[in-house]
Image (cartoon, rainbow, N blue to C red):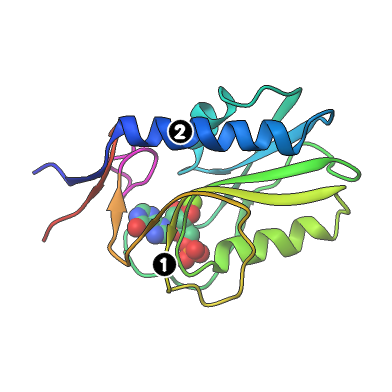
Amino acid sequence: MSPKPLITAEDIDTKLAEMGRRITEDYAGKDVLLVGVLRGAFMVMADLARHIDLPCEFDFMAVSSYGASTQTSGVVRILKDLDEEIAGRHVVIVEDIIDSGLTLNYLIKSLKVRKPASLEVAALLLKEGVQRVPLDVKYWAFAIGPEFVVGYGLDYAGRYRNLPYVGVMEP
Ligand code: IMP
Ligand code: MG
């Protein structure tokens, strides 16, 4: 059974174009380093980047996620660190979804100590009212409820990442 569509491919494209324009304006005259959080953020990263009209470099980090469960463990492990040095650079972390915020909170802390010139977050989805830590997310495209979503990079037990839209798993 296919997940029930929640956000269409067209709506995603419209919002990412808008986000890309904002980033282009906000960082005018600067170079940016986009840091994608693997694996879920690969689609957002690819599509958002095409709407950013600036000198841009790319790097990726991999962190442990939920495994096959839909509950956050609160435990974050870095599986792959950045290849690039970020000191003095304008870094934008690109995330698929912010749920409890624990993953991002940990990432922000571990990147801040490396002294980037600036550090912001661009996320496709923000689950409303469930963050367990205060977070300052400058760019986000859609606020959603607490439901578990898949598609457009997001998985359930490794599957559904290839869906071009964001959908809800039905029981
Ligand atoms: P957090 O640490 O609770 O904010 O969760 C962050 C990570 O959990 C995200 O980057 C996703 O990989 C995963 N995640 C959280 N909510 C969902 C969801 O609804 N569907 C798929 N993955 C999710
Ligand atoms: Mg993720």
Residue at the image point whose x is 73% and y is 27% from the top: 57
Please state the extent of the stretch shown in magenta in the rendering: 151-161
The rendered magenta stretch, by its main secondary structure, is classed as loop
Residue matched to label 2: 43
Q: For mark 1, does the 10 Å Cα neighbourhood hold few (<14), some (14 to 19), or many (20 or more) residues? A: some
Q: From mark 1 to mark 2, how far is it between C-alphas?
A: 22 Å
Q: Is residue 144 left or right of residue 38?
A: left
User: Where is residue 48 shown, x and y percent of the image?
Assistant: 54, 31
Residue matched to label 1: 128
> Looking at this view, is 171 or 126 the one in front?
126
86 in relation to 75, above or below: above
Residue at the image point whose x is 76% and y is 51% from the top: 119
Q: Is residue 54 visible?
A: yes
Q: Is residue 87 left or right of residue 111?
A: right
Q: For mark 2, does the 10 Å Cα neighbourhood hold few (<14), some (14 to 19), or many (20 or more) residues? A: many
> Looking at this view, is 9 or 15 the one in front?
15
Q: Quadrant of residue 105?
A: bottom right
163 in relation to 144, above or below: above
